[in-house]
Amino acid sequence: MDFITSTAILPLLLGCVGLFSLFKVLQWLRMRAYVRNAVVVITGATSGLGRDPGAIAGAASEILQCFGHVDVLINNAGISYRGAIVDTSPDVDKRVMETNYFGPVALTKALLPAMIRRRQGHVVAISSIQGKISLPFRSAYAASKHATQAFFDCLRAEVEQHDIEVTVISPGYIHTNLSLNAVTADGSKYGVMDETTAQGRSPVQVAQDILAALGRKKKDVVLADPMPSLAVYLRTLAPGLFFRLMASRARKERKSKHS
C-alpha cells in the first residue's frame, strides 16, 4: 500500500471507529435516560413474589400506594430444574410453574390496569433460551419458560393499543447460582454448578444488554451464544435433525450419570 492510499484510509478507519464509539455512547445515554426517575419493579424468587402468587395482589397494591404507578416491571423470578420426566412428581412441576409462570403472570395482571389507565408502561419477562427450545432433563423448566414466552407474546399484541411495551428476554447460560438452587425430580436441591453455567456470561454484562434492549424498546431478544441461538433456527427449519441431536444429548447425559 502506497503512502497516498494509506493516508486516505487511515482517517476513514478512525472515522468509522469514532462513529461506532459515538453510537455506543448515545446508546448508553439513551438506556440511562429511559430508566432515570422511573419507578422500576424487579422481582426475584428471593423477594417472595415469585414463590407466593397468592400474596401478589397485596404487594402490587402496596407498590401503587407508595409510588402511584409503575413505569417498568421486570419479571425476573426464576427457579431451575434437573430430572427425568418419569421420575418427577407433579408437585415439582407445579412448584416450578408457580415461580416461573404463575408468579410473573399474577404480578403483571395486578399492575397492568394502572399502566393502561396511564397509557404508559413497559413489561419485561426474563425468560430463557429454553422458552424457545427444549433440552432433555429440563422439562419443568422448559415448559414454564415456553408458557412465559406465549403469555407475554399474547400480552404484547393485546396492550399495543394502550401504548404499553412488552419485552421478552431469552438469555442463554449465565454465571449465577441457578443450577445450584435448581430442584430435582423429588423436590430436593440439585446443588451442582453445571459446567455450562460456570462458563456462562457475566450477570453484569447480561443486565447491561437487557437495559440496552429496554432503551431501544425491543420486543423479543435472545442473549445467547451462537450455538444455542442456532438451535432455535434449527428447531424450526430442520426439526428432524434437531430432534436427533436432542435424543443424542439425552443418551450422553444419561450415560454420564450412570458412569
Image: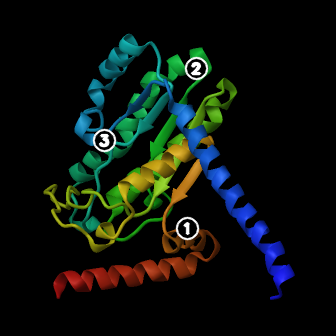
Establish if 136 lies above or below 42.
below
Graded by Cα atoms within 10 Å as few (under 14), some (14 to 19) or many (20 or more), the crowding at tag 2 reads some
Q: Is residue 132 above or below residue 147?
A: below
Q: Position of residue 68 (x, y in %)?
A: 44, 12
Find the residue positioned furthest to the front.
3
Question: Residue beneath label 3, please?
Answer: 98
| Marks 1 & 2, CB-CB < 8 Å contact | no
For the residues carrying marks 3 and 1, which lies nearer the camera in this image? Answer: 1
Between 259 and 69, which is closer to the camera in this rendering?
69
Alpha-carbon neighbours of circle 1 within 10 Å: few (<14), some, or many (≥20)?
Answer: some
Task: State the image quarter where residue 103 is shown.
Answer: top left
Is residue 150 in view? no
Residue identified by numbered label 2: 116
Asked whether the residues under the numbered discs 2 and 3 touch, taking CB atoms below 8 Å apart as contact, a structural biologist would say: no
Relative placement, left or right, of 206 versus 161 is left
Q: Do the residues bearing badges 3 and 1 touch, measured as CB atoms within 8 Å?
A: no
Q: Which residue is mark 1?
A: 232
* Left or right for 4, reference 216: right
Q: CA distance from mark 3 to mark 1?
A: 26 Å
User: Residue flagged by tag 3: what amino acid is it?
Assistant: Glu
Q: Residue at x 23, y 52 (%)?
A: 92
**SS for dot 3:** helix
Q: Is residue 98 left or right of residue 171?
A: left
